[in-house]
Image: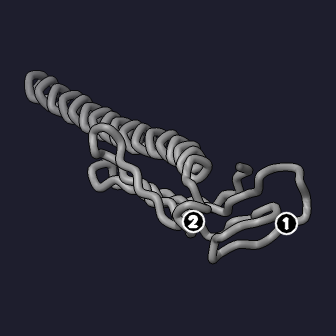
Amino acid sequence: MKKGIGLLWALIILLLVSTMMVFIAKVAFISQKHTTISYGMQRGELFMQSCIENSILAIEGYDRKQNNDCLEHIKFNDEKKRFSCNVDVLRYYCYGDCVCSNKKIIKTPFSNGYVLLKVLVSSKKDNVKLSKITLQRL
């Protein structure tokens, strides 16, 4: 009878240990998945900031008077083709003379003007989609 009770206790302890191991494995899997998603989101946000800065440089470097129009859509991809970025210029806020079709004239010589940008960053591999509307000074 004592051997039977010892065997029963051994089975109960094995069952408890295996349940704890399953729980630990599940928590580790959830933690790893959360870390992967967070990393993808952080990379996407950094790439978005880079797209905004590159868009401003592209807009400032674009000769509006010679081309008689303005940039309205800019597309960027990162070096590994992991993220893509679409930038739409919603409005140009220009000081003085401006040839843009989607312009709004402002009456302050404080800067060369502003642009209202809509930025969309997406990645199929990381399952990330980010969007932002921002007003940037040129």
Q: Which mark is residue 53?
A: none
Residue at 45 percent of width and 45 percent of height: 44
**CB contact under 8 Å: marks 2 and 1:** no
Q: How is the image coloured?
A: one colour
Reading the image, the residue beneath label 1 is 106
User: Residue 62, image x and y in percent?
Assistant: 55, 53
Kind of residue at disc 2: Cys
- Left or right? Give the position of 1 relative to 17: left
Report which residue position mark 2 lands on. Answer: 70
Q: Nearer the viewer, residue 114 or 112?
A: 112
Please give the name of the residue rendered at 82% of the width and 49% of the height, measured from the top-left corner: 111
Kind of element beneath mark 1: strand
* Horizontal arrangement in the rendering, residue 43 relative to residue 137 (left or right): left
Quick one: 63 or 56, which is closer to the camera? Answer: 63
x and y, in percent, of residue 115 in the image: 68, 60
- On screen, residue 1 above or below 30: above
Decide: few, some or many residues near mark 1? Use Cα within 10 Å; few <14, some 14-19, many ≥20: some
Q: Position of residue 92 (x, y in %)?
A: 69, 66
